Amino acid sequence: MQLLSTNACFDGEHRRYQHHSAALDCDMEFAVYLPPAAVGSNPRPVPVLYWLSGLTCTDQNFMQKAGAQKKAAQLGMAIVCPDTSPRGLDLPGEHDSYDFGSGAGFYVNATRQPWAPHYRMYDYVVKELPQLVEGHLPVTEGRSISGHSMGGHGALIAALKNPGHYKSVSAFAPIANPSECPWGQKAFGGYLGNDRKAWEEWDATLLIPTAKERLPLLVDQGTADEFLDSQLNPDALADACERVHHHINLRMHRGYDHSYFFIASFIDDHLEHHASALGLR
Ligand SMILES: N[C@@H](CCC(=O)N[C@@H](CS)C(=O)NCC(=O)O)C(=O)O
């Protein structure tokens, strides 16, 4: 992998890398924040929080807007931010809308053409990227995962489908039950086809009943989120959790919207949640 840039940040480093992804069959960029403990002449391996961003984002939205680095530096936690879709391709219709194709990979493995050979963001974030990061950077195998909106849902399914792989999971305003909302139906229909049976293994709310590991879920949601009623449906996820006693801490925050102003307001709580699970507290 090739280093593109570095920025000093709270005595640690924000870095951007480019590499060829075998899972996606294209070149990808990602960002990593390394805390002070993991940089310098005597770097010590630190655990990693993976952050999955939402529709229209790249690796940069979270790094530039969430204000997570100060707390991550104090805790001794690395943060890795992948992009939100394969890049540098020109598949038919790929760039036509903000909620499908580029910037909208939905963290699933597509089965329909022309998406199937490249749109495998699930394999990329769950398998390929951690292997790459753990092979090249001073990190341990202690992993946690979080994200926002499409990425909040991505974090939930990554954890629910991979018992033992993550120490903790959390989400901001996740698209909690994609099979039942317009964003999810467009993405699942396009990437997976119209047989709803094939959607079940990619929908967090539908995965809850049979989850093999009951990692507690921390979910934050703003009440003034412009997508709350039409797309997000945290109640469906909470109801599914209640039925099988899967612990969920769903926190509703009065007046907060869907933006990174909301994420910045509560990111420290999420970092503390992951730090405890990763043995940093
Ligand atoms: N562009 C869409 C909304 C896209 C959107 O809200 N994206 C969220 C994630 S779902 C985001 O993080 N946007 C980038 C940012 O705020 O930096 C619209 O205008 O309706």
Image (cartoon, rainbow, N blue to C red):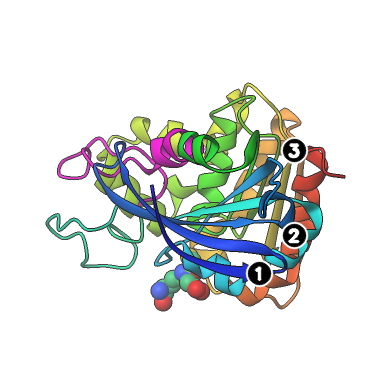
Residue 185 in the image: above or below residue 62: above
Nearest to N terminus: mark 1 or mark 2: 1
Relative depth, front residue between 233 and 159: 159
| Mark 3: secondary structure | loop
Disc 2: residue Cβ within 8 A of ligand 1's nearest atom: no
Q: Quadrant of the C terminus?
A: top right
Residue 161 in the image: above or below residue 174: above
Q: Which residues are magenta?
A: 105-130
Residue at image point 61% right, 47% down: 236
Residue 216: which numbered mark, if any? 3
Q: CA distance from mark 1 to mark 2?
A: 9 Å
Nearest to N terminus: mark 1 or mark 3: 1
The picture places residue 200, in percent across and down from the top left corner, at 43, 33
The picture places residue 71, in percent across and down from the top left corner, at 77, 62
Residue 207's image quarter? top right
Q: Taking 92 as reference, is 94 left or right?
A: right
